[in-house]
Each structure stands twice: as structure tokens, then as C-alpha cells.
Image (cartoon, rainbow, N blue to C red):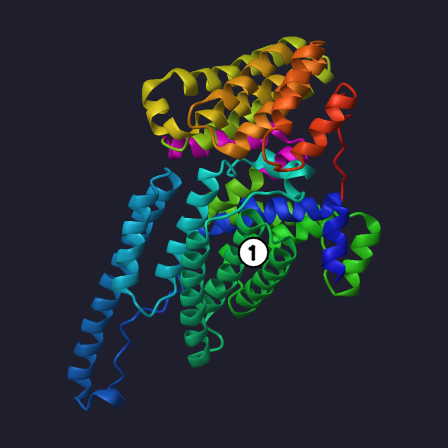
Amino acid sequence: MMGEVVMKRRLPAVLFVLHVTVLLLIILLASYSLAHAQTAAAKLQPEATGKTPASAGAAITATAATVEVDRARFDKTRTEGFEALYNLDYEGARARFKELARAFPDHPAGPQFLAASLWLETLNASRRLQSGLYNNESFYAKTEDKVDPKIVAQFKEWTRAAKGLAEARLKKNPKDAEALYFLGATQGLKAAFAGAVERSFVSALRSGSDAVDKHRDTIKVDPNYHDAELTVGMQDYIVGGLALPYKILAGMTGTRGSKKRGLATLERVVREGEWAKDDARVMLIPLYKREKRFADAARFARDLAAKYPKNYLFKLEYADALVSQAATERANGGAAAAATTEREAFAIFDALLRDKSTRDAAARQLDLIHFQYGEALFVAGQFERAAKEFTAAASVPNAEANQATLARLRAAQTLDLAGKREDALAQYKLVLARPNVYDSQEEAKRGVREPYRRPAAKQSEDN
């Protein structure tokens, strides 16, 4: 009940919890620490073989070699799968993960990774893999947006399988760190799917909390399991950023946090994590932006864009960080530096829209590229250019329906700021003729009543 009341009031802190849960928490599924993995091949013990000590030793050596081969196969298949996933090749990723599930039927990795790939593909298809969307309160509003029930059914089938396999291992060994980790990751994946796809926010918060609990248990069993610190660090940051009354409420349940400690934990995963270094970088990008550490956000986004060249989303995050950095430079009196930084950012968008190889890789996402370009121009105060990009985003032939609605709304708002009221009213009316998504109807009605005003910048709390 408390969770429902909180979500109805749409507290900023809860919005950020969902932002993290939806976009970032589950990216950790892209890499799992296998350093502590238990393999399907059990070690032979002399007492169980009935052989002489010498022959038993030979058997153990032979089995150890099989274990290493299996682990090498596991690691190779996993790496290939996530290389494809990070480069937005969902079919290629699932082919590898299905191979993993067949080769290791008792391991939760196969179904877990399959579910993660389906979740990420669904978000990409609905233009929800950009962090800026989750900073907007309207994302959490009531909407007519619906999800394909077949996708939901398939996702639940794979997460049930992963959960069952992890729990089966824990029945045999309650201190199996890897099984605890996968169980927590499965709960985190369910949280992300509930929040971003099904838009069941209270359910997302419950599952997300359970994910953190399981990963804390993982660290208790193995303090060197740094990959499990991703969720712990995120929770630390989130709770540390709550307004005081809600921080006290969280403390009553035994949950305490610190933004500084949370950031430090995630930065430690970047340095010391086994397979989750890139995942921690992904998580830190929006957190650095929130803390106005735009240069750090840009650095991580640039590195990821270089490592995964077919993933244009990292390039969009890089450009977004640069635009915010430019705004800070201009506010501090560095007009020349700001202009240079903005040119670099705008060049990224222009390249994405112009380069044939990039266009082919992102052919079904041009609406998102135009939209993000519009947002960048909006931040730079170039409202007429921004309105043109938003209009282009809405006009792409295969534009995703919700993205097109948001683009029309943003076009109207920027036209208002550019002093073109009649053009703005025309765009607001187009929004009102479309299905209601992300509070678009309410925002459009407000825009018809009075011209849009640019909201004051919010300051980040330092906890």
C-alpha cells in the first residue's frame, strides 16, 4: 500500500529508483563472473572411484582437463553472445545463449541470458534504451501503452527456468556464491522488465530490493565477488539521494545509503570486477550526469562506443554528455570552450544521420536519433533547430508510435520557446489526436492553454 501511494505521488526519488531499475540495474546481466563457477563435471574423489591412488590421481587430472574445457567453452559462448548483444545483434546473441543452454542445461546462465536479450530488444524496439527518457516524470504516468503478451509469456518462462536452476543449486549448497548471484540477477531482471516493459512500478521495486538482498548474500559468502557489488552500489546511491523524510523511512527498515559510497562501489567494480567492468561503466554514465560530472560520463560513453562500434546508443550517450558539459562551460563563462564541445556533440549526431554504415545499422532507429538531436539542441538553446529535429523524428516513416507522440510534444514546446505560437498550437493539436502516452495529453492541453516555459534546472543533492 505504501508503495502504491508513493508511486501515485511520483516522488523524484522514486523516479530515480525506477530510472536505475529500468535502464541500468539489469545491464549487469550482460556479464557474469564465472571465476567462481561450479562446472557440470564433478571432480572425482579417490573414495568414490574404487581405483588405486595412482589411477585415481590420473582420473582427477583427466576430469580437471574436462572442467577447464567446459569452462573455456562456457566463457567463449558467453563472450560471443554478449559481444553480439552489446552490438545490438539480438538474433546472434540469442543463438549463442541457446547454445549455452543446450550445453549447460543445469546452469541458470542460458535462460537468464535469453531473458535479458529479450528484455533489451523489447526496450530498443520501443526506444527505451536512452537514459534521458527515465529522467522525465511523464514516463511514470498512466498511459495507454501495451506490451505484446507473447513477449511477456516468453520472458516469464525464461526467468522461471533461471530462478529454478539457481534455487536447485542452492538446495545442494546454500553457500554457492554463483547461484546466489544468478538468483539475485534474475530478480533484478524481473524488476527491470516490470518497470520498463509492463510499467508495474511497485512490483519492480519489490523485485529490485530482493535482487540487492541476494547480492549482499553473495558478497557475504565471497567478499571478492565484486560483480555483485553493482546492485549494492546502486542501492547505496539511490537511498543516499532520497529526501530526508524518505531517507528516515528507509532507515527504519534497516536500509541506509550514501551517494558517495555508492559511486565509489561502482567505480571499484570498474577497476576490480571480473566480467562486469563495462556494466559498471554503463551504470555510471547517467549517475555522473546526475552529479554534473559530464566529462567523466563522456569518457565512459566514448570508450564504450569505441569498443562496441555497432551500438549507436553509446554514441548518443556520448553526445548527450558533451552537450551538458558545454552548458556547464557556458554557465561558467567559457563560451569558446562550450562552442567547441557543442560542435563535437552535434558532429556525432550529423555522422549518425549521414554515414551509410551507421544508417544501415540504425535504420529502424532514425526517429530516436533525430529526437536525441533535438534534445541536445534544446539544451544548447537552439530552439528552432531543435523543433526541426523533433518534427523529423515524428515524420520518420517507421517511427515508433510513442516516440512520435513525444516528438510532436517536444516540437510544440520548442516552437513555443522560439516564439512561434501558431506552429506550436498546431503540434499540440496533433498530440491530442494521438493515443495518450507518458502524460502527453495533459502536457498538450496545458500547452494549448498557455505557452510552454522552460523549467528551471534542478540542482543535485550532495550526500
Magenta range is: 286-309
Q: Is residue 266 visible?
A: yes
- Label 1 environment density (alpha carbons within 10 Å; few <14, some 14–19, many ≥20): many
Identify the residue at horizontal 59%, vertical 23% (top origin).
408
Residue 15 colored magenta? no
In x, y percent, where is residue 116? 43, 52
Q: How many marks?
A: 1
Q: Is residue 446 left or right of residue 28?
A: right
Q: Is residue 67 left or right of residue 350?
A: left
Residue 202 placement, left or right of 194: right
Query: Disc 1 on helix, strand or loop?
Result: helix
Looking at the picture, how far across and down is residue 69, in whole percent? 22, 62
Query: Which of the two residues, 79 or 439, is positioned nearer the viewer here?
Result: 439
* Residue 41 vertical position relative to residue 12 in the rendered view, above or below: below
Which residue is drawn at the image coordinates 26% and 90% (left, top)?
47
From this view, report whether residue 175 is shown above or below residue 413.
below
Instruction: Looking at this view, name the residue that lies furthest to the front.
Output: 433
Q: Amino acid at mark 1?
A: Ala
Q: Main secondary structure of the magenta part?
A: helix
**In which quarter of the view is residue 377 placed?**
top right
The residue pinned by badge 1 equals: 191
| Residue plotted at (38% across, 34% down) | 308
In percent of width and height, residue 222 lies at 51, 66
The front one of 323 and 264 is 323
Up the image or down, 379 lies above or below 136; here it is above
Image quadrant containing the C terminus = top right
Res. 256 visible in picture: no
> Looking at the rendering, in which quadrant would you find the N terminus?
bottom right
The percent position of residue 192, horizontal first and vertical second, equals 54, 52
